[in-house]
Image (cartoon, rainbow, N blue to C red):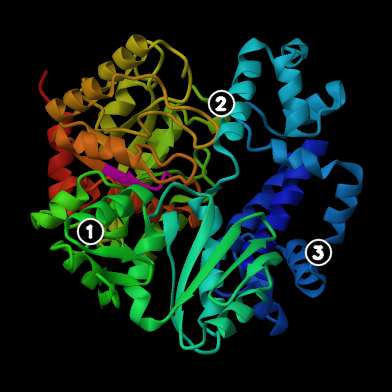
Amino acid sequence: MQNKEIAEIFDTLADLLEIEGENPFKVRAYRQASRAIRSLYRPLEEMVRAGEDLTKLPKIGSRIAQKIEEIVRTGKLSKLEKLKSRIPESLLALLPIQGLGPKRIKMLYDALHIDTKEALLKAAKEHKISQIKGFGAKTEAQILEALTMRKQQGLRFLFCEAEPYADALTAYLQKAPTLRRVTIAGSYRRKKETVGDLDIVASATDPREVIDYFTKFEKSMHTVLAGDTRATIVLENGLQVDLRVVLEESWGSALHYFTGSKDHVIRLRQEAVEMGLKVNEYGIYRADKRITGESEEAVYRSFGLDLIPPELRENRGEIEAARNHTLPHLITPNDIQGDLHLHTHISDGEESLEAVARQAISLGYRYIAITEHSRSLPYTKGAKSDQLNRLFDEIETWNRDHDELYIFKGAEIEILQDGSLDIDEAVLDRLDLALGAIHTHFSLSKKSQTDRLLKAIHNPHINIIAHPTGRLIQERNAMEIDLETIYRASAQTNTILEINAQPKRLDLNEIQIKHAKQFGVKFSIASDAHSTAEMRYLKYGIHQARRGWLEKEDVINALPLKELKSTLKSVSSKGR
């Protein structure tokens, strides 16, 4: 049993307890345990088998340790099974929907016996939800919008949801008999925000043996197809996985073909026809003679192109750039020197300043910024001025006593409806870095929303605009904004636009990033972490930046500390 599966059991337990109205401290303890488990590198199953003391792990007390041992031994948790007998498990499917939470789900269940998305959609369309005390027409409209978006998008998985299965499948297949190579291709390899399925390409001396081995994967729910060179299975979470096995000589052609995108592959096929070539997953042919296909480099070379990184293969100018040798040198994880959007328990984070700092050091960062929420948002435990001042004192003490990591005094400041900032002037004066962010009033008109953001961009205190469009993938559309006007203003004032790496945000998206870069905008890639485990989310922002054609020079947290300090000062002194 993987750590992720154990963590999911605790998440489900916490969700059901919260729906039932359990003590919030107990619910919080289970959520903290889940986050701690996800951040572990050693398998808990291995530790339990070895008889190790789990209470030495962070956030794991004796009762939770006992529950982990029970899960490892039996594959389930009796406390959770009892809860499921009292509360419809289908209620859990309602939790990710924008506008809902455990308490509201319980209210809907008690008032209208709503326990499925279908029942919720029907009630929203019939305007029954707005009649329940504590909801109203606005919440009802939010719920309806979120449900409609999910229905239109079909069954797709966030990249981070597919990732553990992709990793497990790769590790499993690497042990297959006669296997030579294996890679996850498709939209997953291109690092898309969501994936509909997983496409795996493998090479082997005996494809049929690999197919047979693949269909025995322990997370497979059932096999759809099992042929001589291809197979399809559906995993326990509903994710479909397609495997293609080719001979080694066709590896490059198959990997290129199944990586896509469709538009990119079609464009190259059209060029192949003009060159008198034929392209398929087995190779590149002139007449009936196969001329290449053993590597992706060879495939692109046959078209006179440089190798195109998978993240760029969307037919958005990458083929022309590859022909002209002007492909960008895409930013890499090794270029990142720090994270400029982090939360501690002072607002809605889970851990202390010390814990966050130690995790940053372990990640090899040279600097971080602690950016607690400002006061007006109760659901984010927005910090008041005295709390922020005490935090800043603690940061100054850290910087005086430590050389290995510099901490910037920051804040994530709410941009109010009129564009003003939700923070005291005296606190602003102590900040090294100020993030402006919008968490409310998403439905303003395009002009009002644009003016709201422009006022913040032109504010001399604001360094960075956090998650600029406010979207939540599969849950909430981006705000209506005149983005070109925002890009121009950001470039003019040297205000940084954030690429927020939270898996449900990934905001800006790759098209917006590439467009903004053309205006001369600079970016910050930030995890927006609320726990030390979430600090590793930064990699998803790097995926997004690469898809947006960004290079090291475009990203401020790829700068050395001294240069970053200078950059932040230039933003703070931006002329009007």
Could you say where residue 451 lies in the image, as x and y percent from the top left?
29, 13
The residue pinned by badge 1 equals 272
Q: Which residues are magenta?
A: 524-528
Cα separation, mark 1 vs mark 3, equals 55 Å
Question: What residue is pinned by disc 2?
Answer: 378
Q: Main secondary structure of the magenta part?
A: strand
Q: Is residue 252 magenta?
A: no
Q: Verify CB contact (< 8 Å) between mark 3 and mark 2.
A: no
x and y, in percent, of residue 68 in the image: 74, 67
The residue lying toward the viewer, choosing from 132 and 114, is 114
Give the vertical position of 250 relative to 470 (above or below). Answer: below
Mark 1 touching mark 3, by CB under 8 A? no
Q: Residue at x 71, y 40 (%)?
A: 93
Q: Secondary structure at mark 3?
A: loop
Residue at the spot of label 3? 76
Question: Residue sitting at 45 percent across and 43 percent down?
Answer: 343
| Label whose residue precedes the other's in the sequence (1 or 2) | 1
Is label 1 in a helix, a strand or a loop? Answer: helix
User: What residue is shown at x 18% (from left), y 35% (from top)?
Assistant: 521
Check disc 2: other Cα within 10 Å, few if <14, some if 14-19, many if 20+: few
Left or right placement of residue 131 versus residue 276 in this view: right
